[in-house]
Amino acid sequence: MIARTALALLPLVGFAFIGGSDGVARPSAAPACAGIQDDQVWVPGGLARFGSDAAYPDEGPAYEARIKGFWIDRHEVTNRQFAEFTSATGHITQAEREGGSIVFDPPGPGEVPVEPSQWWSWVEGADWRHPRGPDTSIAALPDHPVVHIAAEDAIAYAQWAGKDLPTEAEWEFAARGGLEGAEFVWGDELVPGGRHMANTWQGEFPYQNSGEDGFEATSPVGTFPANGYGLFDMADVLNLR
């Protein structure tokens, strides 16, 4: 089962940005320097099909839309990048102001979880600097995606960086990497040739993750292969057995 790419815009995971400050028209054709620019990637526009009629009910109905070309960050915003932002602006995130955030808390042995409230818990002191609570730290995670970020925090970062948040359609278009109709953003096989293509869940969700891909939580940006546009970490996947 795949968690569709649009879900990557949820506030508890990393986020990426499109080029251009708020209100500035995005280019309709690739500029002369098309390619990589300040660690951004040019995504050519085109007609594509969005959503799905075969997955979760809230992903349908599928529809077609034409997307203009745009620049987008090569990877999610990291703890290192977000720290630069807070150092420069003094920004305090919503989680810090409210004294905590929601943390993944898998159920214990023998429990039969049936709804998200059974694997997510409010933790006092959890925020982007303390991912799992006040006794945890990001000191060893500078290149991991920043987490516990609300929409207002993402918008504040975007304004500081002179960029925009991508729309859902832009994100999904970029995530596909030029593929159309594939099951995953890299193709139709979850682990082609035995190679893990994303930070996935292996095992019985939500209480047992074997970590076969090398990670049980977040992973450094750029750890897994880029998609067809050269973008990293554009899908979250649950491998349920």
Image (cartoon, grey):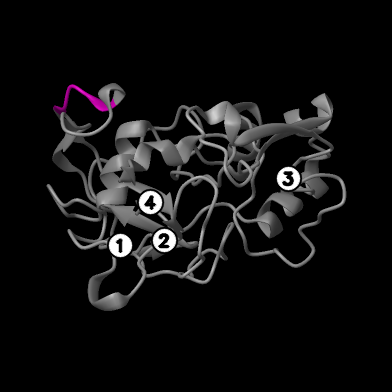
* Dot 3 crowding, Cα within 10 Å, few <14, some 14–19, many 20+: many
Report the quarter where the C terminus lies: bottom left
Please state which of residues 15 and 100 is positioned toward the viewer in this rendering. Answer: 100
Magenta residues, as a range? 59-63
**Kind of residue at badge 4:** Val
Q: Quadrant of residue 171?
A: top left
Side of 191 where 78 appears, left or right: right
Mark 1 and 2 residues: CB-CB less than 8 Å, in contact? Answer: yes
Using the numbered discs, state the Cα–Cα distance from disc 3 to disc 1 in whole angstroms: 27 Å
Q: Quadrant of residue 8?
A: top left
Instruction: Give SS at disc 2.
Output: loop
Please state which of residues 128 and 134 is positioned toward the viewer in this rendering. Answer: 134
Label drawn at residue 128:
3
Query: Looking at the picture, how far across and down is residue 208, in whole percent?
Result: 53, 54
Using the numbered discs, state the Cα–Cα distance from disc 4 to disc 1 in whole angstroms: 15 Å
Residue beneath disc 2: 232
Instruction: Give SS at disc 1.
Output: loop
* Dot 2 crowding, Cα within 10 Å, few <14, some 14–19, many 20+: many
Q: Is residue 239 magenta?
A: no
Q: Which is in the foreground here, disc 4 or disc 3?
A: 4
Please state which of residues 66 and 36 is positioned toward the viewer in this rendering. Answer: 66
Residue beneath disc 4: 237
